Image (cartoon, rainbow, N blue to C red):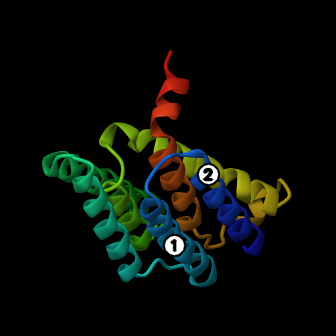
Amino acid sequence: MKLYSLLMLIYFVATGYVVSVPFWHWLGLGLILLAIIHYDFKSLRIPNLMNVALAGLGLFISLKADRSFFDIMISVVVMTVILGGMMLLYQRLRGQSGLGMGDVKFVIAAGFWIEISAMPIFMLLSSSMALLYYTVVSKGELGKIKHQHVPFGPFLCFGLWTTYFYQQTLFHLLQF
């Protein structure tokens, strides 16, 4: 947990030097995400207040960047339907929850930051980082963590940060 938090802090600071965005975008998002990473690793929860702060700042910055309110709401509604549906389907098929409501609310809040076209990249990055982390932590024996509750929020933070600041580069790299 501490190593991941430290690596994310280094990654956040490095991004500030590489990407030309206003300092307060970088600082505001970074502080909220670091708080979520720390809290979710400790308690396996993402508090509503942190998700509200994430959504509120994202809405403010997106509107200031001339993203239409309609476009923002489309992203939020689509992510609500997709993640809510996935959560319910998993619960129905497996008889247990696989995604916490804090994670679902985080992804909904991410819709205020990134456009709907970037959502697949966001989810791919988040899921890939989680799989990589838990493969390393379990030393390749994923069966060890099969029945444990593991936080997904820290990896959603990585996915949101990377998608928000590197969206155009990622789209360019993924063109066929």
| Three-letter amino acid code of the residue under disc 1 | Leu
The residue indicated by pointer 2 is 17
Please, what secondary structure does the residue beneath circle 1 have? helix
Q: Residue visible at 53% across and 43% down?
A: 124
Please, what secondary structure does the residue beneath circle 2 have? helix
For disc 2, the neighbor class at 10 Å (few under 14, some 14 to 19, many from 20) is: few
Question: Looking at the figure, which quarter contains the N terminus?
Answer: bottom right
| Three-letter amino acid code of the residue under disc 2 | Tyr
Q: Is residue 87 visible?
A: yes
Residues tagged 1 and 2 counted as in contact (Cβ below 8 A): no
Q: Sequence order check: which comes first, mark 1 or mark 2?
A: 2
Please identify the residue farthest to the top as the structure is shown: 176
Which of discs 1 and 2 lies nearer the camera? The answer is: 2
- Residue 84: % across, % down: 32, 59
- Residue 79: % across, % down: 31, 52
Q: Is residue 146 visible?
A: no
Q: Residue visible at 39% across and 59% down?
A: 107
The label on residue 31 is 1
- Residue 150: % across, % down: 62, 70
